[in-house]
Amino acid sequence: MSTLQRIALVLTVIGALNWGLIGFFQFDLVAAIFGGQDTALARIVYGIVGLAGLINLGLLFKPSEELGTHPEAKHVR
C-alpha cells in the first residue's frame, strides 16, 4: 500500500468516525472544530475526506495478492 493510500485510509476512517458521531449523537465534529458546516475550512475538510474515499475505492478492485492479504503471501520486512 502506498503512502498516499495510507493517508487516504486514515482520512476515510476520520470521515467514518464523524459520520458515526452524526448518526448516533447528532454531533458533527468537523463543523464544531471549524465553525460550522458552511465555513470554507469545513467544506475543504469534507472535500478532502471525500477524495480520500475515492482513492480508497481502488483498494476494492486490487487483487488480494497485491494487498499482501493472500493466505499464502510471504511477508518479508
Image (cartoon, rainbow, N blue to C red):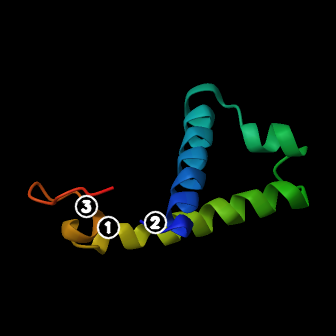
Classify residue 28 by image quadrant: top right
- Crowdedness of circle 1 by 10 Å Cα count: few (<14), some, many (20+)? few
Q: What residue type is labelled 2?
A: Asn
Q: Which one is in front in this view, the residue at disc 1 or the one at disc 3?
A: 3
Image side of residue 73 versus residue 50, left or right: left
**For the residues marked 1 and 3, what is the alpha-carbon distance in whole angstroms?**
13 Å
Evaluate if marks 2 and 1 touch, with contact meaning CB atoms under 8 Å apart.
Answer: yes
What residue lies at 70% left-to-right and 32% top-to-bottom? 27
Image side of residue 46 versus residue 3, left or right: right
As helix, strand or loop, the secondary structure at mark 1 comes to helix
- Crowdedness of circle 2 by 10 Å Cα count: few (<14), some, many (20+)? some
Residue with the mark numbered 2: 56
**For the residues marked 2 and 1, what is the alpha-carbon distance in whole angstroms?**
7 Å
Camera-side residue: 55 or 22?
55
Image side of residue 28 versus residue 75, left or right: right
- Decide which of tag 1 and tag 3 comes sooner along the chain: 1
Q: Which amino acid does label 3 sit on?
A: Gly
Name of the residue lying farthest toward the left: 72
Query: Taking 20 as reference, is 1 above or below it?
Result: below
